[in-house]
Image (cartoon, helix red, strand yellow):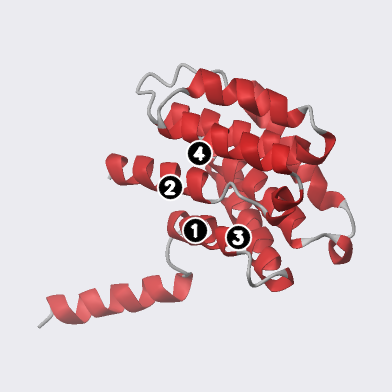
């Protein structure tokens, strides 16, 4: 199960990195590609250096924050000792989540996507700290933001994997649990 979790997190963090606004700027796209390549090679320090360069570009700051969080979470998911300090990561999730504070009717699909990524990362960090209520709340907020992104732009397919993962971690809806329980009871009684 732990291997599957690590694999899903790695896939999420790699596939969801390309936002449509990055197409407008070749430098942002090139940095994004280099960050993903470094991360896939396991070169997290290089990926983090490139994230800092991306964050220095005003139009790439939010994407840089998201990719830095993704890189740190990937490294953290493979760190059996969990030796990474997460306080800075929590602050970064706050920066992405603050982007949701605008009037929701004015947010773009990409802004909802970044907001969802912030909530998804915060859910992961909260669960690691044993704060399961906060993890569930942020997980639900991530689902809501990812779905809003798809409503705004159904072609933004990068949202689909993190949305699926958020639903996976959230577990089945309550109605499904009752159906499963009732089915197990009927089956056990023959």
Q: Nearer the viewer, mark 2 or mark 3?
A: 2
Q: Is residue 136 above or below residue 69?
A: below
Q: Give the image location of residue 176, x and y in percent.
A: 40, 74
State the CA–CA distance, disc 1 to disc 4. 20 Å
Q: Is residue 32 above or below residue 114?
A: above
Question: Which residue is tagged 2?
Answer: 11
Question: Which residue is tagged 4?
Answer: 127
Q: Nearer the viewer, mark 3 or mark 1?
A: 1
Q: Nearer the viewer, residue 24 or 52?
A: 24
Q: Nearer the viewer, mark 1 or mark 4?
A: 1
Q: Which mark is residue 161?
A: 1
- 102 vs 128, left or right, is right
Question: Which residue is tagged 3?
Answer: 143
Q: Earlier in the sequence, mark 3 or mark 1?
A: 3
**Badge 1: few (under 14), some or many (20 or more) residues near its Cα, within 10 Å?**
some
State the CA–CA distance, disc 3 to disc 1. 11 Å
Q: Secondary structure at mark 1?
A: helix
């Amino acid at each position: 199960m732990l291997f599957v979790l690590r694999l899903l997190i790695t896939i999420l963090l790699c596939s969801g990195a390309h936002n449509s606004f990055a197409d407008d700027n070749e430098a942002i796209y090139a940095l994004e590609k280099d960050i993903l390549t470094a991360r896939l090679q396991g070169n997290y320090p290089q990926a983090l250096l490139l994230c800092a360069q991306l964050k220095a570009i005003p139009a790439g700051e939010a994407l840089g924050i998201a990719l830095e969080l993704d890189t740190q979470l990937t490294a953290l998911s493979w760190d059996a000792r969990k030796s990474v300090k997460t306080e800075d990561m929590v602050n970064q999730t706050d920066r992405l989540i603050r982007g949701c504070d605008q009037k929701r009717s004015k947010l773009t699909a990409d802004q909802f996507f970044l907001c969802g990524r912030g909530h998804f990362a915060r859910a992961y960090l909260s669960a690691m700290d044993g704060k399961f209520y906060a993890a569930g709340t942020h997980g639900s907020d991530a689902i809501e933001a990812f779905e809003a992104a798809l409503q705004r732009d159904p072609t933004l397919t990068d949202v689909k994997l993190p949305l699926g993962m958020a639903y996976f971690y959230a577990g089945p809806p309550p109605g499904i649990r009752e159906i499963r329980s009732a089915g197990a009871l009927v089956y056990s009684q023959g």
